[in-house]
Structures are given as structure tokens and as C-alpha cells.
Image (cartoon, rainbow, N blue to C red):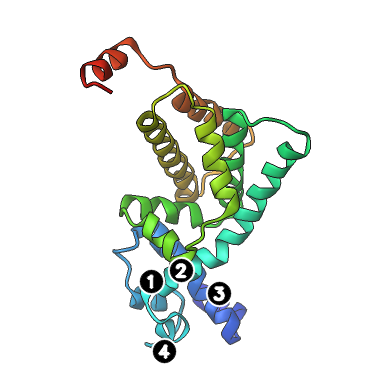
């Protein structure tokens, strides 16, 4: 009954394409990109034509690119709007400001019931997230670069390798944490997100310990 209802909503070719994109996004997010076949996507979407996915997307990689093309523009626009709010009043990004610009568009996607963030988490686990984004958007997004610059700018007291390590840890934690909400269907309450940003800000900006400084000194770094 569920399949019939979904197929009724996606009657035209354009709607069938959207159905396949959203079905693949959910399956990749729940089970992992490498664990899902095109046949799995076709069956879950209630499509009988064995070549329907290849007809619309050419390959599994093309399907993944289509998911990013479907989700990324709105998230990038939202992130850009948040950045411009600070620029408009002449404010200088703090670590917390930059984190909110990073996190809020992703949290908004989770609230909408989308599986995009959980998909990104799976791509990160599979170590193909960088090449996926390069293939989908070789130039990158302006808002994404702006967030990265903002995060680096608030960590000037740290060596470059420490900055890079902490930014990667924050990105990984943000995706992993929000992905759990998406996969379990747990509501992301308004009071929870500020507390999560607290934790990510602490992770990003924690002072370097004496032990770390000593180890770095011995290593000549």
C-alpha cells in the first residue's frame, strides 16, 4: 500500500527521477553507499523497469551526484544568508558564529525529514566524501569556503596541523551527531542545538595542554 501511494505521487518522468533520488538518499544514509545497489534503489522506489535508474542517472555515481545537486543548493543558499547577516552589521565571526552558520542549515535539513546529513556521514565513513564533492561541484561553494576560512581565522594561535585536525574533528562530530537524529527520526528540540554548539565550540577552541606542548617541542614542531 505504501509503494502504491508513493508511486501515485511520482507519476511523471520528472517525479520518477525525484523519487529515485530521495529513495537512494535514504538507502545510502541508512545502509551505506557501498552496501546499496541500483537494484535496491529501483525495488525500494517501486519501479519495475530494471534499467530505470541507469536511464535517468547513467550510473551509481551519477545518482549520488544527483542527490547532492538536489540538496546542496538550498543548504548553500541558507548558509550564505546566515553569513551575510553578520557581514551586513560589520560583525567579525567568532568561533560560535561560524559554527552556527555551519550547523544550522544541516540541522534544518534534519528537521525537514531529509536524509542528506546522514548520507554525508556515510560518505565520510567510506572516505569518499571529498571526491564526491569534487565530482559534483569542482569549484566548491562560496559559503562553504567562507565557513572554512572563518573557522581557521579563530584558531590563529594554533599551528596549522592543529587547526586542520580540530576542524576535521568538528565536521566529523557535527555530521555524526546530526545523522543519528535523522536515522532514528528523533526530534531535534530547539534547546538541544545550542548545547551541541557549546560542545563543538569547546572541541574547536580548547586550549593546548602542557603535555601537548611538550610533545610538540620534543618532536621539533
Residue 200 in sight here: yes
Residue beneath the point at 36% across and 51% down = 124
Q: Quadrant of residue 166?
A: top left
Evaluate if marks 4 and 2 touch, with contact meaning CB atoms under 8 Å apart: no
Residue beneath the point at 45% across and 83% down = 47
Residue beneath the point at 45% across and 44% down = 175
Which structural element holds mark 3? helix
Q: Identify residue for label 1.
A: 61
Looking at the rendered image, the disc whose residue lies closer to the viewer, 3 or 4, is 3
Q: Identify residue for label 3.
A: 18
In space, the residues marked 3 and 1 are separated at their CA atoms by 16 Å
Which structural element holds mark 1? helix
Q: Which of disc 1 and disc 4 is earlier in sequence?
A: 4
Q: Nearer the viewer, residue 20 or 187?
A: 20
Q: Which of disc 2 and disc 3 is earlier in sequence?
A: 3
Q: Is residue 216 left or right of residue 175?
A: left
Q: Is residue 39 left or right of residue 133?
A: left
Q: Is residue 70 left or right of residue 64?
A: right
Q: Which of disc 2 and disc 4 is earlier in sequence?
A: 4
Q: Callout 1: 10 Å neighbours few (<14), some, many (20+)?
A: some
Q: Position of residue 161 (x, y in %)?
A: 35, 32
Q: Nearer the viewer, residue 146 or 204?
A: 146
Q: Which of disc 4 and disc 3 is earlier in sequence?
A: 3
In space, the residues marked 4 and 1 are separated at their CA atoms by 19 Å
Looking at the rendered image, the disc whose residue lies closer to the viewer, 4 or 1, is 1
Q: Position of residue 201 (x, y in %)?
A: 52, 27
Q: Position of residue 68 (x, y in %)?
A: 50, 63
Tell me, for residue 65, which label it has, or none.
2
In space, the residues marked 4 and 2 are separated at their CA atoms by 22 Å
Evaluate if marks 4 and 1 touch, with contact meaning CB atoms under 8 Å apart: no
Amino acid at each position: 500500500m505504501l509503494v502504491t501511494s508513493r508511486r501515485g505521487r511520482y507519476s511523471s518522468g520528472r517525479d520518477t527521477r525525484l523519487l529515485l533520488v530521495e529513495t537512494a538518499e535514504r538507502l545510502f544514509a541508512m545502509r551505506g553507499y557501498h552496501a546499496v545497489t541500483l537494484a535496491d534503489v529501483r525495488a525500494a522506489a517501486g519501479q519495475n523497469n530494471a534499467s530505470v535508474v541507469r536511464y535517468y542517472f547513467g550510473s551509481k555515481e551519477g545518482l549520488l551526484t544527483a542527490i547532492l545537486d538536489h540538496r546542496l543548493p538550498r543548504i548553500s543558499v541558507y548558509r550564505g544568508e546566515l553569513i551575510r547577516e553578520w557581514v551586513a552589521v560589520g560583525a567579525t565571526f567568532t568561533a560560535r558564529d561560524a559554527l552556527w552558520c555551519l550547523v544550522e542549515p544541516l540541522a534544518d535539513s534534519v528537521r525537514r525529514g531529509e536524509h542528506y546529513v546522514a548520507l554525508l556521514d556515510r560518505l565520510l565513513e567510506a572516505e569518499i566524501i571529498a571526491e564526491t564533492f569534487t565530482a559534483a561541484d569542482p569549484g566548491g561553494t562560496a559559503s562553504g569556503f567562507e565557513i572554512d576560512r572563518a573557522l581557521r581565522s579563530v584558531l590563529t594561535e594554533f599551528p596549522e596541523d592543529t587547526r586542520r585536525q580540530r576542524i576535521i574533528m568538528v565536521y566529523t562530530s557535527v555530521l555524526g551527531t546530526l545523522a543519528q537524529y535523522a536515522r532514528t527520526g528523533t526530534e531535534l528540540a530547539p534547546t538541544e542545538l545550542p548545547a551541541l554548539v557549546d560542545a563543538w565550540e569547546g572541541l574547536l577552541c580548547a586550549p593546548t595542554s602542557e603535555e601537548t606542548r611538550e610533545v610538540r617541542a620534543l618532536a621539533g614542531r
